[in-house]
Image: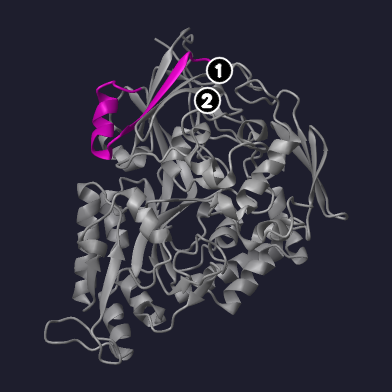
Amino acid sequence: MKRKNFLYRMAVMTTVGVMATTVLQPLTVQAANFPNEYVNHKKALKHATLRVAYAADSPFRGVFMPFLNDDVTTLAMASPGEVKLFKNDENGKLVKGGFADVKFDRKNKTALVTVNKKTRWSDGEPVTSRDVAFTYEIVANKDSGSPYYSSALENVVGVKEYHEGQADKISGLEEKDERHLLIHFKEMSPTLEYVGSSSLYNDAQPYHYLKDVPFSELAQSDKLRTHPLFFGPYQVKKVVQGESIEWVPNKYYGGPKPKLDKVVMEIVPTSLAAEAMRANKYDMLLNTATAGYSKLKKDKNLVTLGSLSTDFTYLGFKVGYANDEGVSVMEPSLPTSDRTLRQAVAYAMNVKEVVDNVSNGVTKQANSVISPAYGNYHDKKLKPYLYNLKKANKLLDKAGYKRGKDGYRTMPNGKKLTLTLLAAADDKTGEALRANYIQLWKKVGLKVKLYGGRSLDYNNFLKVLMSKNKNDFDLWINSWSLPEEPTSLPNFAYTPDSEFNYGHFVSKENSELIASFNSPKAFNEKYRIEQMHKWQAYMQKEAYIVPLTYNYDLQTVTKKVKGMNAKTGDKQLSFWDSVALTK
């Protein structure tokens, strides 16, 4: 398992899927093999500037706080300064040796966080227990607008009361002194011991710097958008909003001294990124798969690093809405509430064919909502939705979806049926693949139109996806970027009160299965794995979301780059403090 994607910060993020880079081979096909590290034995240059490109077709939002930000591009652009608080092994389990350490007491239901003396903000102030507690307050305060608040966080004693305005502080956060925070939980669960826990945050925020900013104004504050503080290897020198960031070494960094004088990161359109690397305009390209690995793989001056990630791309169905309290409610009158229709839509997609002909080995067809990168938690026995127009037609015929003279089907009640696809803008290949799916759905008599008649740029796509408007779209394609904790996806995204439950799917069986993952019985890993397999089978059958592909995290570097390792965790807390340039 991983987070072998060193760009991951700590919370679950959504990222636009887009078909050109998200469709993949069946699990029986041999996976691509990418190295995690490029070894360069040359002597590092002094006073070097690293030029970094991030392939994306939309500007980054520039809110440099993970819990107020659902933009994975901003997360990537912030990676030279962002580091996680705790260290973890290659399986995502928390271990000693981080910028802070954590010790669990199952009997007393507590976790003691101890901040390392060397951990300092880029303005020189020490990172304190108050900063760790402040992170919880930001997420739990309604005025902050954080999308990461959910009932899972209410496992911390006092969070619910604070969130509802019944208390002015979180009673379960006990600041023993400047370096020690004792967190009191209602229940202990296995998820607490892994990166990506929904109730033990792997982060701190500078209280001394942000305390005078009202929670409601944090996301718009220059202190987060233009002059943010970090406790990682580099600090921000200059931000051109949406376009670029210039980084210089953080002289107060508590890890190894950074090797570069400057890091300049720029957003580069996906259609231009590969050629820019080949023309030596950049030393590093992040998000290589999106940029077009096929254009780079034969260049002898470039090396692509990476591995199969925990991320996956999926087709989602909107089956309900969020009520006034933000809780998801199923809407039986929606056409997508019919499981037969959802399954037919999935069977009409030629995902395997697209993977085999387009992906260049950087994706694999998915059979489950849990990636093989999670090891035994992934149920390899589940069957994917393989392209089968005959089966799709049979399902629709049997369920009463009759074809009209125009070739399109009507609802079983005789009403017209048109499905609206919410789509994010992509390159020419991605747009062609989307058109391919729409044509295949037409072949089984399903009329599918684009939301607003066109694809949207990523930021607007996300706004619509997260809006509380009823019945404005029926299905969408997107990707999840996930941490190492194997139950992070259901815990964060598929509970009734999660803002990431975009389709508003809820059921008693789903809630019971999710609750079982972190029950006291789940400290028995065999039981936890069994329950996860049950949940995967349930999700695959119900098809509220249909997993399409598993994705590889790929980064391309020139052979002048030294100290680059795409796998963090037990080896290093951040690759940025070791990367350098040579002749």
Question: Which residue in the protein does label 1 denote?
Answer: 258
Q: Which mark, by number, is residue 514? A: none
CA distance for labels 1 and 2? 7 Å
| Vertical position of residue 472 compared to residue 566: above or below | below
Evaluate if marks 1 and 2 touch, with contact meaning CB atoms under 8 Å apart. Answer: yes
Instruction: Tell me the SS state at disc 1.
Output: loop
Q: Amino acid at mark 2?
A: Trp
Q: Position of residue 268 (x, y in %)?
A: 30, 33
Position of 492 compared to 342: left or right?
right
Image quadrant in which the C terminus is located: top left
Residue 576 disc label: 2
- Residue 561, by quadrant, is top left
Q: Amino acid at mark 1?
A: Pro
Q: What residue do we see at 53% from left, 23% from top?
A: 235
Quadrant hosting residue 471:
bottom left
Q: Report the side of 363 relative to 180 (left or right).
A: left
Sequence order check: which comes first, mark 1 or mark 2?
1
Residue 23 can be seen, yes or no: no
In the displayed structure, 166 sits above or below 21; it is: below
Residue range corresponding to the magenta coloring = 259-282
Percent x, y of residue 194: 67, 48
